[in-house]
Amino acid sequence: MKERIPFNDSWLYKPSFTSADPCGTTDTAEYSRVDLPHTNKILPYNCFDEAECQFISSYKKLFRVSKNWEGKTVLLEFEGVMAACDVWCNGIHVGGHEGGFTPFQVDLTAAVRFGEENVLTVKVDSTERKDIPPFGNVVDYLTYGGIYREVWLTAADPVFLSRIFLDCPDPLEEEKTLHCSCEITARQTCESTVTVTLFSPQGEKIGEQTETLSLGQGCGKYRITLSHLQKIALWDPDHPNLYTAEAEMRAGDNRDICTERFGFRSARFTPEGFFLNGKRVKLIGLNRHQSWPYAGYAMPRRVQRKDAQLLKEELGCNMVRTSHYPQSRHFLDACDEMGLLVMEEIPGWQHIGEEAWKERSLKELEEMIVRDYNRPSIVLWGVRINESQDDHGFYTRTNALAHSLDPGRQTGGTRYIQRSELLEDVYTYNDFTHDGGEEVFRPQQETTGLESPVPLLVTESNGHMYPTKRFDQEQRLTEHALRHLRVINESLGREDLAGGISWCAFDYHTHSSFGSGDKICYHGVFDMFRNPKYAAYAYASQKNPAMQIVMEPVTAASRGEKDGGGMVPFYIMTNCDFVRVYKNGKQVADFYPQKEDFPYLPHPPVMVIHLMEADVISGFSGEDRQQFQEYLDKRMREGTLTGLRQEDLEYLAKLAHKYGLDVKGLVTTVIKSAGGWGDIANNLVLEGFWDGRAVCRREIGEGKYAAGITAKPDDTVLYAGGETYDATRITVEAIDNRGNLMPFIQECVEVKLEGPVSLIGPARFPLTGGISSFWIRTAGETGSVRISVEGMTGRTECALEVELAVPLT
């Protein structure tokens, strides 16, 4: 029976490498203790030199293997090392790998000493080598360095199961067939029996088939088919039903088991759109980089999975693109489990290298497909270097390889040039047309240059067209949110479009050639700490209100924040039917979603256009009240109520004369309805109504003041002693007396920890736009954790527990 154990604790690390390192010595004086995942360099949050993490380093591990493992094949599996490595065991070179985003294994059998202490040495080259994708030219993201994903040690019998690959040729048929290709490695030819059992999401056995196989020497694939499977629940974003296939092999005294999860689903891109299980689904999502402040790529399971939760559950997206490389299995596991569709693509950014570079890219494509073959969430393989020029020969090969490895999935190739050669199944295109004007996406024929419609998916929009820091002025943050709403609206409204994946989910580190001068691309709807900008609510507000009510005012609620002064207009991102506004205790009006501007959105934003109390015009006739509201609406769309024109004054004078009002008083009232200068503090209450009743309430306004800080952990229980260390995020927020974020507070806070955890990053940092986050990780022991955070605004505490790890299911 194969034994597979995590191999992530108690490594030794040195930020250099010499010829003496592989020799097998146990002298570790220059090394420090680390755990995997590990980044080779803790970088500052911004303004660093990107070359700081581009160097060659050395990892060592002292380990023993049982005498019982003699006669077995001993394999060391790496999930990801950036960007190339060589491995020695007891001074004997046992293998290596080039490429930082895909897994590989090395065979230790001939080098390991059973029952004795062994020395493993790994030389890690984290330089941006021109022969390894995505490097060779400039790259719009930082790749960091180190052994940044998990490692496993495996002992296998002379005959063992490596993998099983699962296919359902007709998932929409009532009775389904499941093909299970078992990859079996044998040291010599022999006979074997293999039993494949399929279990339902509830763990019930629903199908089984046993075959007797004649195994050849080496590694081979053997197909076993389960037929007439009934009452199979399909996988989709609302019902991510996952089945488990278990293959049990017996060959003489050898027995081995391999399990894989699988979802039955049909996914096809056509010129009419994307169809999942025969039903048309509009794809709305964001691109994701797998990077974090300080830790770079090196985050464990819980933190990786959190990104999928943010995209699917908090924002309501149904699609993500793994830009621009294969990402953590933990993130993809969560996509499978939560129902988040995925386009996964090979590493690269614009540059195509020489022939050796291309061969490496083809190898990474193969490694990506083999790793993630069984995932129902993946509906499209990205087989083109992001935004590269056409290369007929190279992309003919990438498409052919993808189709030979996986005939069931379609391919896409992300480009930003129009009329690019289409070799893939889907024309995937980065459309950056929208610059705030009326045009959002180009017509399909203008994009593709083809006479006939083809499957079309927009894979990037916005992003660098409008970089936004979460502490920018309100009007820029508002426009950022509106641009994302316009893209979603266009994606939903275009009949010839499968959907749109906008750029991007999270801000990310980059090189000096890009970003905002501090090595950060501020392109995300979240910042790097996963805290939302207003644009995040553009997505969240499109969720079904029966699942979650969203009402987020996109305003600092201060008259001095806008150009020219005044508090209106401001938007509310909401899925409520309408919002009722009160000012200083008096009802203003009910404001409704802007359906005329966003006809295809399920929930257009609500625009608050004035703050005039309802009783001011209570004496007007119904027709005049409506005309007056339309006047305020039109005037606010054109500019601001704080600067009235001659025609405005004439209209108001006529209205005042009709109802016996003082003209100056009415003009002053109109100006004050904008929350303009000279009025008392405007304090607002927003009530959201859905299905005929008030369902949420927010208080905002100018009578705010700093009331303290809060610290909220994403999780209250961590686990020690699992595959590797556990980690979670704690978010620190400066709040006002109404419980709202105070975006103008930039003070520093200091974190102190008690208990078996440690900080990832600095203990003292600034609140950026009134908010920031930090991550803590377990330190191998159990116990209670108390976290205190203190700054000028106040002090707060939060607590969590570290418990023994539970087995992963």
Image (tube, rainbow, N blue to C red):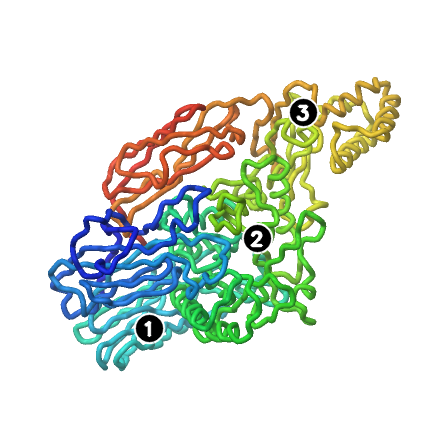
Instruction: Name the N-terminal-most of marks 1 and 3.
Output: 1
Q: Nearer the viewer, mark 2 or mark 3?
A: 2
Q: Are the residues tagged 1 and 2 within 8 Å (C-beta)? A: no
Q: Which residue is mark 3?
A: 587
Residue at the front extreme of this rendering: 19
Quarter of the picture holding the C terminus: bottom left
State the image coordinates of residue 759 (x, y, percent, origin top left): 33, 39
Q: Are the residues tagged 2 and 3 within 8 Å (C-beta)? A: no
Which disc, if any, is residue 494? none
**Residue at the image position 24 percent from the left and 51 percent from the top:** 12
Q: Is residue 763 visible?
A: yes
715 with respect to 468 (left or right): left
Dot 3: within a 10 Å radius of its alpha carbon, few (fewer than 14), some, or many (20 or more) residues? Answer: some
Q: Nearer the viewer, mark 1 or mark 3?
A: 1
Q: What type is the residue that disc 3 sits on?
A: Gln
Which disc, if any, is residue 502? 2
Closer-to-camera residue (395/349):
349
Q: What type is the residue that disc 1 sits on?
A: Cys
Q: Which residue is mark 1?
A: 182
Q: For the image shown, how many numbered marks are present on the structure?
A: 3
**Residue at the image position 19 percent from the left and 48 percent from the top:** 29
